[in-house]
């Protein structure tokens, strides 16, 4: 796409994607949920070094963008679980591309 | 990759990539440079709604990560041009994936 010369439609779609995924946490949260539903504390541990306040805000944004869903189970006391939606799973190609580029980037920065 | 269960190596590479690209500007700057080298003011216009201070800081980070280079031309007065490096161009797959996901995301959010 980089070779297709910076046309505005492409930039708009990239902007949309970046807005839904902005910050350093959202993709990591989705990545953690990709291996199965998790409760808040499990998720916090899986993501690592995120504060409860930030995690909570990020989860709300992800839910708003239909990337995850929040299920309240009728237990006593009630339990809450977060899971990734099919729309969230559709980020697989983005995650794959980021993963492979991340590996290449690390090599490049280490080598030079 | 999402189906490969959240293994730590994958998360690390994604973290590396997200750190190099964090914020909403870097990919848009790279996208703007993908159509050819630009001077600071041209770049500012192409990216849109970015302040000079932020653009300047983002360019420094991108240069540090070897994604762009800054060339000073021996004119009078000297002129500075920014261009994307081959390493920056290697983000093509990431940009493509973000572009297509961004289109799907817009449809999804509009529809529901």
Image (cartoon, coloured by chain):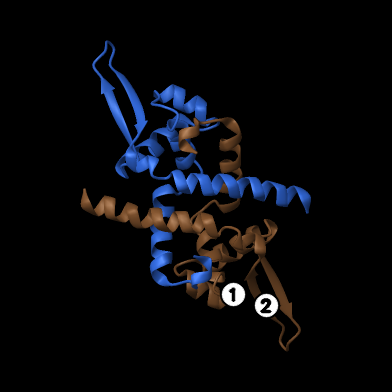
Chain colours: A brown, B blue
Q: Residue at x 61, y 59 (%)?
A: A90
Whichever of callouts 2 and 1 sits on the residue coming sooner in the sequence is: 1
A4 and B67: which one is in front? A4
Q: Residue at x 59, y 76 (%)?
A: A38
Q: Quadrant of the C terminus of chain B?
A: bottom right
A86 and A30: which one is in front? A86
Mark 1, secondary structure of its residue: helix
Q: Position of residue A16 (x, y in %)?
A: 61, 44
User: Relative to A112, does residue A96 appear above or below in the rendering?
Assistant: below
Label 1 crowding class (10 Å Cα cut-off): few <14, some 14-19, many 20+? some
Q: Is residue B61 visible?
A: no
Chain under callout 2: A
Residue tagged by mark 2? A80
Chain under callout 1: A
Mark 2, secondary structure of its residue: strand
Location of residue A66 (image quadrant): bottom right
Q: Position of residue A1 (x, y in %)?
A: 50, 39
Left or right of A110? Residue A15 is: right
Label 2 crowding class (10 Å Cα cut-off): few <14, some 14-19, many 20+? some
User: Relative to A37, does residue B93 appear above or below in the rendering?
Assistant: above
Q: Which dot marks residue B30?
A: none
Q: Which dot marks residue A40?
A: 1
Q: Is residue A84 visible?
A: yes
Q: Residue at x 42, y 66 (%)?
A: B10
Location of residue A30 (image quadrant): bottom right
Q: Given contact means CB atoms under 8 Å apart, are the residues at marks 2 and 1 in contact? A: yes
């Amino acid at each position: 796409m980089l070779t297709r010369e910076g046309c505005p439609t492409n930039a708009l779609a990239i902007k949309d994607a970046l807005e839904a995924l902005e910050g350093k946490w959202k993709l990591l949260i989705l990545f953690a949920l990709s291996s199965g539903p998790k409760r808040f504390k499990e998720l916090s541990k899986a993501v690592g070094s995120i504060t409860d306040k930030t995690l909570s805000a990020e989860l709300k944004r992800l839910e708003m963008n239909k990337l995850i869903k929040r299920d309240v189970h009728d237990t006593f006391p009630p339990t809450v679980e977060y899971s990734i939606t099919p729309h969230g799973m559709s980020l697989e190609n983005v995650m794959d591309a980021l993963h492979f580029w991340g590996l290449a980037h690390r090599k490049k920065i280490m080598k030079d």
